[in-house]
Image: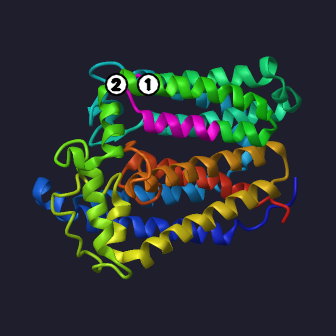
Amino acid sequence: MKKEQKADWLLTCCIVILVVIGVLMVYSASSIWASYRFNDHFYFAKRQLLFATVGLAAMQGVSRIPYHSWRRYAKPILLSCFILLAMVLIPGVGLVRGGARSWIGIGAFSIQPAEFIKLALLIFLADVISDRQKLITHFFKGFAPLLLLVMFCFGLIMLQPDLGTGVVLVAACLTLLFAAGAQIKHFVFLAFIGISGFAGLIISAPYRIDRITAFINPWEDPLGNGFQIIQSLYAIGPGGLFGNGFGQSLQKYFYLPEPHNDFIFAIIAEELGFIGATGVLIIFSLLLWRGVRIALGAPDKFGALLAIGIVAMISLQVAINISVVIGLIPVTGITLPFLSYGGSSLTLTLASMGIVLNISRHCYY
């Protein structure tokens, strides 16, 4: 193992900048909602600042833990996440929000186990594949058993149901398997099964069909299923080149539902304009670049796979969220990493980046 060096400074800067932007934009996007519901303009901003502080502290602490230490706890961590994910489905334990039973209440706060199992599964897969590198090219001995585990996790998440989180989990894990050396023909075979299964999931739930219909023609039902995407586009369009100015959004006045969550990028575009929105995308691109570079420079297979898995998880979530906001794909309910309001997502994402930062301490550049 190479002597430990300083963590990647550019990646650290990107993360901190995104978190700061997130806290500011959560305040701007949520102030009207917070005042109406809680008589406190800063209600969501204060909680987001608390989550950000805890998350940054967790990132700093995790960045000091040797990344290979996670291998010893890969199975217990995954098992614990399985238990939490199962507990969510128990009436009276799991909290229902937005039609999905995805949270467990802990005092005044709540956690979303599906967020934690994404990282747990990536750690486990990286550990297993590192020990059985050659088997990953064999479908039945290597690829299929790991794929079954991924689909089992996906099934638990779909029982909530939470299709968006499930899609991110599967996509990140498949990216890790591809990076590990799984054969292309296995993915082609999987694609046929996946498309059929995905179509079945959409058909089985009427609200998902409504989202597809709204995506194709949101103006067909502008006050119903097409409302969110229309209001999102109404926010992005008037933003122009430089935006209306920080805090000057009109769509946050009860037009765009809960603008501090899934559609916060629309408020960023409205207030900061094309320049501001592009700046955010550039920072995310830098984060992706540094993450991939760290994975390529990792001193061992476990570090490389874990880094690429975590970076893929975050990058895919960014791509899906922004695609929804600008109308490229149907609404999925996926938050924007570092920027959207939410404790579990922000804290877990920052802790995950702490692992990547620790890997960067041992990289060969």
Asked whether residue 45 appears in the rendered view, the answer is no
Q: How many marks?
A: 2
Q: Is residue 140 magenta?
A: no
Instruction: Specify few, some or many for label 1: CA neighbours under 10 Å numbering under 14, 14-19, or 20 or more.
Output: some
Q: Residue 198: x percent and y percent?
A: 50, 28
**Residue at (39% x, 24% y) in the render:** 203
Give the spatial CA distance, label 2 vs label 1: 7 Å
User: In the shown orientation, is residue 4 left or right of residue 326?
Assistant: right
**Residue at (48% x, 69% y) in the render:** 280
User: In the shown orientation, is residue 79 left or right of residue 347?
Assistant: right
Q: Secondary structure at mark 2?
A: loop
Residue type (three-letter) at the residue carrying disc 2: Ala
Residue 256: quarter of image = bottom left
Residue 356: quarter of image = bottom right
Q: Secondary structure at mark 1?
A: helix
Above or below, comparing residue 30 to residue 115 in the picture: below
Residue type (three-letter) at the residue carrying disc 1: Leu
Residue 245: quarter of image = bottom left
Q: Residue 115: x percent and y percent?
A: 48, 39
Question: Mark 1 — residue?
Answer: 201
Q: Which mark is residue 158?
A: none
**What range is drawn magenta here?**
159-173
Above or below, comparing residue 169 to residue 19 in the picture: above
Question: Mark 2 — residue?
Answer: 205
Camera-nearest residue between 265 and 19: 265
- Asked if labels 1 and 2 touch by Cβ distance under 8 angstroms, the answer is yes
Q: Is residue 168 magenta?
A: yes
Asked whether residue 60 appears in the rendered view, the answer is yes
Q: Residue 152: x percent and y percent?
A: 56, 21
**Quadrant of the rendering where the C terminus is positioned:** bottom right
